[in-house]
Amino acid sequence: MRERLFLYFVYVLLIGFALICFIPFWIVLINSFADEANIQTSGYQLFPTSFSLNAYSFLLSGKQVFRSYGVTLFVTIVGTTLGVIITASYAYVLSHPKVKYRHVLSFLTFFTMLFGAGLVGFYMLIANWLHLKDSIWALILPYLLNPFYAFILVSYFRSLPYELNEAATVDGANDMYIFFRIIWPVSLPVIATVALFYALQYWNDWYLSLLFIDNYRLHPLQIMIRQLISNLNAMSYVGGSQTDYNIMIPTFGMQLAIVCITIGPIVFVYPFVQKYFIKGMTLGSVKG
């Protein structure tokens, strides 16, 4: 009886915690279809009394949503691909026992995790020295090599038997062949984990666009949310030159609708890659 009561208590606790996590998403989703007048008079409700598609029709009437989606997809796909290749290659160098200066490189990599140049130095590097102001590459290059992700890969590469490298070297394989044809296939779980981390980082990033992108045509989805919330002239931002100030802007519903539109792909992708999150969390927790 004690075990059964404890089990019921755990179930109730987990269900309550799940509801606490789910209710905010439900409020955002259901009120994005609510009528604007209903939101203004009654606030956000669990079950609105009137529904409308004005917020979605207003957002999709202009071209900015599609432009921002294209920018975010390009940055996420290209950034994730390049970031995984560069980070994995660098981590393989750090983990290779025959690389002469691997300890120096490891120290320099770890040093960047503790100390940085600050905002002024970072801005000068990207905008003044690399001349990436208002360039889509300003949203990709700064995140291509993440020291934390590199050390995750280093930990995994060191757990692989070095006999794989020796056997391939005896057969005449060079380092590039060993890495991409031998190490890479057996490291797919951890590489998929790091790829997922990179994809989430690029998809959710708004900081780089806030610093370096003034051209609204290059705004990703996350900075678009900020503009729609803070910009008083939302009609001009979304509709471009096709502006009609006689149309009432569904302010509250539009904010909720853009959140639903932007988080959609991640919500649908996450269940398929959730196991890789668990792999990444437990990687390196057991030594030996």
Image: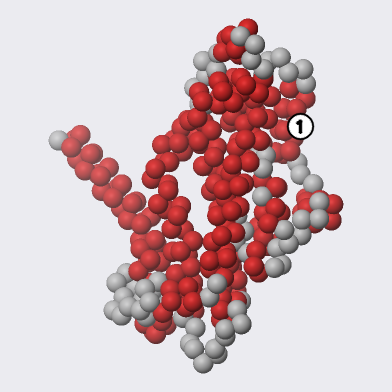
> In the figure, is residue 36 to the left or right of 142?
left
- Decide if residue 234 is in sight here: no
Location of mark 1 (residue): 108
Residue 194 lies in quadrant? top right
- Label 1 SS: helix
Residue located at (62% from left, 21% from top): 177
Which residue is found at the position 57% from the left and 70% from the top? 64
> Which quarter of the image is occupied by the N terminus?
top left
Pick out the residue farthest to the top.
Answer: 170
Q: Quadrant of residue 217?
A: bottom right
Q: Using the rendered image of the protein, determine whether residue 98 is visible from the camera's viewpoint.
A: yes
70 sits left or right of 133 in the view: left
Looking at the image, residue 165 lies above or below residue 13: above
Q: Residue at x 57, y 84 (%)?
A: 242
Of 246 and 119, nearer the camera is 246
Q: Residues within 10 Å of mark 1 (few under 14, many from 20)?
A: few
Q: Residue at x 77, y 56 (%)?
A: 132
